[in-house]
């Protein structure tokens, strides 16, 4: 039987506010356990929540970016369940009246544009964290501990429609969403620190069916690669169960990256199990027209708008435009380099950023905003390629020296110090061409016999004599004229 995978994602985006959603405790990562939890976060008797306005502003910014309906009145609800790191025994969230509804995420995959609808996005507080590994109690005994530093951290939970039909599509959606929230500055996107966490709802059904199958939720996957692997494994697991006469149990499952498998965690609750009701300690959240207009006025230019500009005004390819806008830091680096070159050589800049610079950054496991080569330095290198001071081959040697910090990364000083200036004097090149022709009569005969490789071999002889510093275009032009005359 042919099966169809049906996927919907729920993404918890930690909003980058200095304090928590209902208290003034810090949200900074890495503090000692329970040093950033006050009476509200610990649910001490009599402590009341006070809403953080900056949380709403960041949520509205996301809604504007994805074309969502912004509900100017939304309501906080209590989601009731027991867990050791949830001190109130309920989580403050939004249920039937969320801050955002609808919208879409648009991305390209395998030369196709995909539009994935969003169901909603709602505000909620994070829970604390249970510590199990390498944790000992006051007397040295093996124990579990509770850290409430995360309790009350503001989250925007973004829920997609079950519109995705492959793990690759889900991973591309998640990458695009990640890039957007970082671009907007509403989230730092650090998946290792839990700032961006993805849950995948996965089900399968026979192709042609319209009824959804029983879904399983894969929780808190912390990389896009693992998301794709987890979905593929889970889909195949469900297919195997169904094809052997079994039934799928609605449950929450964890993905084990070491074993590349999912395993059952608990049966999956439905909304009724949480006994939602409006939180009596919090008034409805009301957004004024003036507030929304003010946020709209402060919005940065969005990735889609940048891509269109890069393609239409800078004549970049769709691929280049996509890659340059995948992350805000890459876009900023490209535009700073372009500005240093007064708007010239956009294609050459894109090539160097997306190939040579990207390769060394990947090897060094660094992001582009950590690059030791600054945009104005890369612009200096490209300037010397464009004016034929150095060849592409020499440029890569200069680039390596810049990366290693030679001459403080100044390309002109490196070129001067190493003697890398390209020989563009036609008289000097002509002399070297004559010498190569005279020294290689058999290769010349092969060229006249129609062997193309012979020409490349003669070019190589000239470049060798010039120690790689002759202008290869001039070499080829002068050599061919002499051979054909």
Image: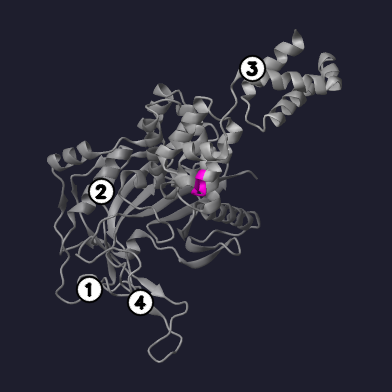
Q: Are marks 1 and 3 in contact (CB under 8 Å)?
A: no
Quarter the N terminus occupies: top right
Mark 1 = which residue?
Answer: 43
Which residue occupies the extreme bottom position in the image? 139
Separation of marks 3 and 4 at Cα, in angstroms: 79 Å
**Where is residue 90 shown, x and y percent of the image?**
28, 68
Q: Are marks 1 and 4 in contact (CB under 8 Å)?
A: no
Nearer to us in this view, 200 or 172: 172
Nearer to us in this view, 49 or 393: 393
Separation of marks 2 and 4 at Cα, in angstroms: 29 Å
Of circles 1 and 2, which is in front? 2
Disc marking residue 288? none
Of circles 1 and 3, which is in front? 3
On screen, residue 224 versus residue 48, left or right, reads right
Separation of marks 2 and 3 at Cα, in angstroms: 64 Å
**Where is residue 403 shown, x and y percent of the image?**
51, 46
Of circles 1 and 4, which is in front? 4
The tag earlier along the polypeptide, 1 or 3, is 1
């Amino acid at each position: 039987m042919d099966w169809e995978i049906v996927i919907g994602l729920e993404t918890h985006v930690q909003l980058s506010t200095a304090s928590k959603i209902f208290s003034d405790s810090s949200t900074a990562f890495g503090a000692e356990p329970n040093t950033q939890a006050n009476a509200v976060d610990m649910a001490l008797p009599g402590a009341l929540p006070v809403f953080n306005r900056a949380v709403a502003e960041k949520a509205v910014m996301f809604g504007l970016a994805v074309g969502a309906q912004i509900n100017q009145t939304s309501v906080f609800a209590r989601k009731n369940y027991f867990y050791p790191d949830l001190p109130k025994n309920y989580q403050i969230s939004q249920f039937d009246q969320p801050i955002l509804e609808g919208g879409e995420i648009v991305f390209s995959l395998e030369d196709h544009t995909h539009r994935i609808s969003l169901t909603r996005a709602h505000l909620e507080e994070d829970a604390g964290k249970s510590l199990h590994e390498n944790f000992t109690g006051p007397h040295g005994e093996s124990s579990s501990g509770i850290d409430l530093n995360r309790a009350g951290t503001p989250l925007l939970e973004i829920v997609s429609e079950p519109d995705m039909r492959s793990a690759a599509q889900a991973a591309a959606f998640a990458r695009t969403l990640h890039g957007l929230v970082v671009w907007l500055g509403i989230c730092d996107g650090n998946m290792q620190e839990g700032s961006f966490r993805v849950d995948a709802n996965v089900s399968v059904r026979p192709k042609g069916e319209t009824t959804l199958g029983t879904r399983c939720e894969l929780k808190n996957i912390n990389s896009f690669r693992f998301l794709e692997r987890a979905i593929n494994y889970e889909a195949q697991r469900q297919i195997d169960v169904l094809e052997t006469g079994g039934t799928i149990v609605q449950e929450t499952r964890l993905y084990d990256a070491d074993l590349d498998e999912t395993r059952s965690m608990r049966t999956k609750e439905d909304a009724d199990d949480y006994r939602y009701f409006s939180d009596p300690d919090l008034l409805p959240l009301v957004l004024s027209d003036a507030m929304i207009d003010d946020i709209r006025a402060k919005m940065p230019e969005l990735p889609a708008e940048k891509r269109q500009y890069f393609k239409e005004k800078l004549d970049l390819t769709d691929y280049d435009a996509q890659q340059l806008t995948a992350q805000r830091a890459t876009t900023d680096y490209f535009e700073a380099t372009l500005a240093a070159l007064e708007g010239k050589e956009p294609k050459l800049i894109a090539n160097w950023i997306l190939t040579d610079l990207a390769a060394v950054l990947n090897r060094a496991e660094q992001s582009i905003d950590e690059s030791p080569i600054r945009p104005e330095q890369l612009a200096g290198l490209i300037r010397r390629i464009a004016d034929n001071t150095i060849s592409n081959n020499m440029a890569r040697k200069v680039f390596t020296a810049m990366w290693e910090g030679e001459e403080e990364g100044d390309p002109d000083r490196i070129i001067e110090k190493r003697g890398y200036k390209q020989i563009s004097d036609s008289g000097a090149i002509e002399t070297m061409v004559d010498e190569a022709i005279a020294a290689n009569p058999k290769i010349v005969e092969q060229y006249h016999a129609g062997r193309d490789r012979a020409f490349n071999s003669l070019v190589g002889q000239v470049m060798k004599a010039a120690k790689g510093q002759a202008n290869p275009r001039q070499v080829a032009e002068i050599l061919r004229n002499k051979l054909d005359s």
